[in-house]
Image (cartoon, helix red, strand yellow):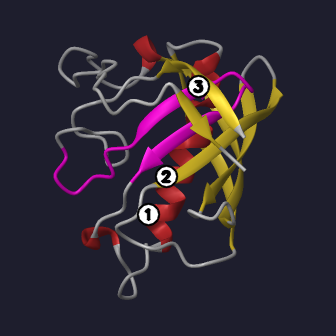
């Protein structure tokens, strides 16, 4: 089913997951959808492998952690989620060199914490990795030495940004 993209979230310069100038990063783009889900789109490279042709489990954890942790930004774009815990289930190998989608959604929201779930989806829609995380809400201005200008924390648009995203 296709869902309309409501908004694109910020990228940074050097983040492992969203850093556009990190040569070894995932360069993931994050899109807020009309169904209240956040979707990350990324294409893992050979530098992200464990076994030949397979994404390293730690990198899978990183993209899920980042995506679930960004769900709160759909409500407050200046609120970061700092991981309290993250539980994952690895179901299928994640291939390299293919564009993949990660979905995440909010499951609980309190004044100081939030929880969310997420999934790395294969091209055929099967769930490769699923997870649940708990995060502490931290305002951007209270992050350690975070300078949005220095980190190039911005929304970068390009011609390949989707207007809608197909999800199973």
Q: Are marks 1 and 2 in contact (CB under 8 Å)?
A: yes
Q: Between marks 3 and 1, how big is the CA–CA gap?
A: 22 Å
Q: Which residue is mark 2?
A: 63
Quarter of the view holding residue 18: top left
Residue 80, given in percent of the width and then of the height, sits at 52, 25
Name above or below for residue 96 compared with residue 85. below
Which region is colored magenta?
22-42
Please state which of residues 114 and 23 is positioned toward the viewer in this rendering.
23
Earlier along the polypeptide chain: callout 3 or callout 1? 3
Q: In screen coordinates, is 30 left or right of 168?
A: left
Earlier along the polypeptide chain: callout 3 or callout 2? 3
Q: At numbered mark 1, what does the secondary structure look like: helix, strand or loop?
A: helix
Q: Residue at x 69, y 64 (%)?
A: 127
Q: Residue at x 31, y 21 (%)?
A: 157
Q: Are marks 3 and 1 in contact (CB under 8 Å)?
A: no
Quarter of the view holding residue 146: top left
Q: At numbered mark 3, what does the secondary structure look like: helix, strand or loop?
A: strand
Residue 69, given in percent of the width and then of the height, sits at 58, 37
Q: In screen coordinates, is 47 left or right of 70?
A: left
> In which quadrant is the N terminus drawn?
top right
Q: Residues within 10 Å of mark 2 (few under 14, many from 20)?
A: many
Q: Residues within 10 Å of mark 3 (few under 14, many from 20)?
A: many
Name above or below for residue 107 compared with residue 159. below
Verify whether residue 55 appears in magenta. no
Q: Which residue is mark 1?
A: 59
Q: Residue at x 62, y 24 (%)?
A: 4
Q: Which residue is mark 3?
A: 32
Please state which of residues 48 and 110 is positioned toward the viewer in this rendering.
48
């Amino acid at each position: 089913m296709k869902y309309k993209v409501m908004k694109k979230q910020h990228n940074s310069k050097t983040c492992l997951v969203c850093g556009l100038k990190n040569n070894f990063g995932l360069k993931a783009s994050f899109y807020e959808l009309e169904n209240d889900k956040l979707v990350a789109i990324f294409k893992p490279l050979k530098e992200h492998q464990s076994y030949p042709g397979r994404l390293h489990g730690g990198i899978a954890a990183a993209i899920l952690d980042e995506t679930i942790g960004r769900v709160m930004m759909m409500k407050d774009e200046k609120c970061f989620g700092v991981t309290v815990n993250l539980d994952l289930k690895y179901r299928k190998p994640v291939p390299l060199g293919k564009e993949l989608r990660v979905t995440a959604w909010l499951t609980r929201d309190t004044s100081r914490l939030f929880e969310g779930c997420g999934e790395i989806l294969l091209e055929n829609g099967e769930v490769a990795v699923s997870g649940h995380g708990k995060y502490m809400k931290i305002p951007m201005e209270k992050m350690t030495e975070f300078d949005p200008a220095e980190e190039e924390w911005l929304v970068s648009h390009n011609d390949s940004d989707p207007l809608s995203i197909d999800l199973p």
